Amino acid sequence: MHTKYKIFLLTTFVLFSTCLQAVILNKEEAAKADLATLEDEIELFKSINMGITLSIAHCEGNDSCKLPMEEREVQQLVKTLEYRIDSLAARQSEIDDIIGFNKVLSAYISLRDSYSSYIERIQSIVMQYRNKNDPSQFGEEPDFPVEAAIDEELLDYLNELTLFEDDELKDDEDLGDDKDFPQEE
């Protein structure tokens, strides 16, 4: 089984199992959520984090890998995390459990930082992929598809073989070793 499919299945399983327990809260729910609900959401963000980590690790250095997520999707997660951090900072005076509050706040900050680093890594992977697949970096772009160039090279090679065989046949005819053949009258 391909590594890409294993990563996809693992990510799907992790997300499915955590979705049974938690969801990413909308702004209104997050503003009113208690610490236990926010901790459940943090676990979901950690699961997504693991899936992104595995996907990026699989695609780094792999020219033919297409990332299963886009930069804008990770940016949306960063925006959501930033909103959570701002929302918690605004609610700081209302929270009774300051230790739990600090734990949740630091978890959101840590996740935001890791997601931000993923954006940079995704950008570098996309740039590497574009650079390796961009024919303009090697000079002028060809007027024909690269596949056609490969086919032309093959055709030229086959033509050379045909010419070589024709030359050998002409050489054999010139030898005069035709005593085994019936004589023409």
Image (cartoon, rainbow, N blue to C red):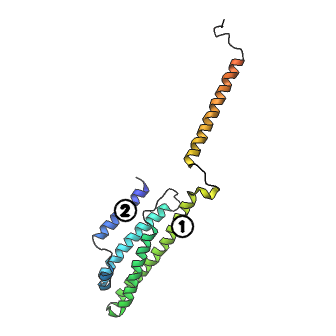
The residue tagged 1 is: 124
For residue 35, side relative to residue 118 (left or right): left
Rendering coords of residue 147 (x, y %): 55, 46
Q: Quadrant of residue 68?
A: bottom left
* Secondary element type, mark 2: helix
For residue 115, side relative to residue 20 (left or right): right
Rendering coords of residue 22 (x, y %): 30, 74
Q: Against 66, is 38 above or below?
A: below
The residue tagged 2 is: 10
Q: Amino acid at mark 1?
A: Ser
Q: Quadrant of residue 98?
A: bottom left
Q: Which mark is residue 18?
A: none
Specify the farthest residue to the bottom.
93
Specify the farthest residue to the top.
185
- Residue drawn at 61 percent across, 54 percent down: 141
Q: Against 159, is 91 above or below?
A: below
Rendering coords of residue 42 (x, y %): 36, 77
* Secondary element type, mark 1: helix
Q: Against 93, is 48 above or below?
A: above
